[in-house]
Image (spheres, rainbow, N blue to C red):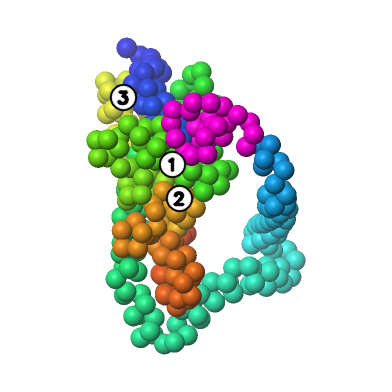
Amino acid sequence: MSADAVVRRRPWALYAYAVFFLAFLYGPVLLLPLFSVNESTQIAFPIRSFTVRWYRELAQDQQLVVAFGHSVSVALAVSLMTTALGVASGWALTRHRLPGSRTIIGFMMLPLVFLPLASIFIFGTSKGLASFWAALTAADAIFALKLSMVTSFWATMFNVLFGLFAAYVLSRYNFWGRNALIVTISLPTAIPTAVAGVALLMLWGPYGMLGRLLRPHGIEVMFTAGAIVLANIFVTFPLAFGVIKPVFDTMSRSLEEASATIGATRWQTFWHVTLPSLRGAIVSGALLTFARAVGEFGSTIMVSGNLAGRTQTAPLYIFAKFNEGQIEAANAIAIVLALFSFLIFSVLFFARDWLDVD
């Protein structure tokens, strides 16, 4: 068999895997339109009658209309500002023909990035390091940090593994529905994370489409650590996939074809030829996914229950302590998360030569 035939042979098992996993991951989003026309005021399945009156009531809710207008206005303003700052920063840091351009960019970033981050450290240590350490080592604080790390680790492992094979299928083979799958994978970057949490509740909640079937057997998916992992997988999957797929797209297939010519199977070629070339993309995708999952809030608060000492992650701990007026406790965890994020992006920046594999 020729190398070209080996490389181009359609891997139906991988097709099935990609479709099944993406349906499992993004299926909850498809339930949102269905439940939005449910006559019942409760999240319950099966749906017995349909109505559009909820949409009429929403259109007549002036508070909602005003809030939606504010959201659109803020989104437009932020988009314009970040685009302008990004272009100006990129030009200043690469061209820097205008004298003092880097200084100007520094002053522009001061109130937007540097001062807000500095305020966390200032307020977090305002009562001394002893008080900061006591707040950081509180039992609930330690549990929240551990839970965030563990759930983020498992979400990262799943997303790197699934993202790797999904990127392989979608970059190496053309098939019907390929572009739709790529667009679907990008959905979490546009959907508010709170909406993602609601979608997961519709499917896995106690009265959801699948949750109601599992509940009689004593299986609870929502309001557990597993629900946090599921939410993190949903929200962060585009990060791992988005880093790995472009490397697949630009990778030369000559080595894969040569490997097939000498008798290597597709899996041997993938393991010994393709995978080593993806080292940088895999590590970068894993670090970005982990950093994003550790800080996830919107979907997590919907599916976890936010129970202190049980399902409360670090961001939820910050939110709860801030609402309770315990600013120092909230800032202590915020400092840890800020330092952790800085560490991850420092690794990505200073190890970029090692991560770039030709």
- Distance between mark 2 and mark 3 Cα atoms: 42 Å
Residue at which label 3 appears: 266
The quarter of the rendered structure image containing the C terminus is top left
Callout 3: helix, strand or loop?
helix
Specify whether residue 169 is in view: no
How far across and how far down the image is residue 84, in percent? 72, 56
Closer to the chain start, of discs 3 and 1, is 1
Q: Between 89 and 328, which is closer to the camera in this rendering? A: 328
How far across and how far down the image is residue 97, in percent? 73, 63
Q: Which residues are magenta?
A: 29-54
225 lies left or right of 247: left
Amino acid type of disc 2? Answer: Met
At horizontal 34% and vertical 69% (from top left) the residue drawn is 141
Tell me, for residue 302, which label it has, or none.
Answer: 2
294 lies left or right of 89: left
At horizontal 65% and vertical 36% (from top left) the residue drawn is 55
Q: Residues within 10 Å of mark 2 (few under 14, many from 20)?
A: many
Q: Residues within 10 Å of mark 3 (few under 14, many from 20)?
A: some
Q: Residues within 10 Å of mark 1 (few under 14, many from 20)?
A: many
Amino acid type of disc 3? Answer: Arg
Q: Residue furthest right?
A: 98
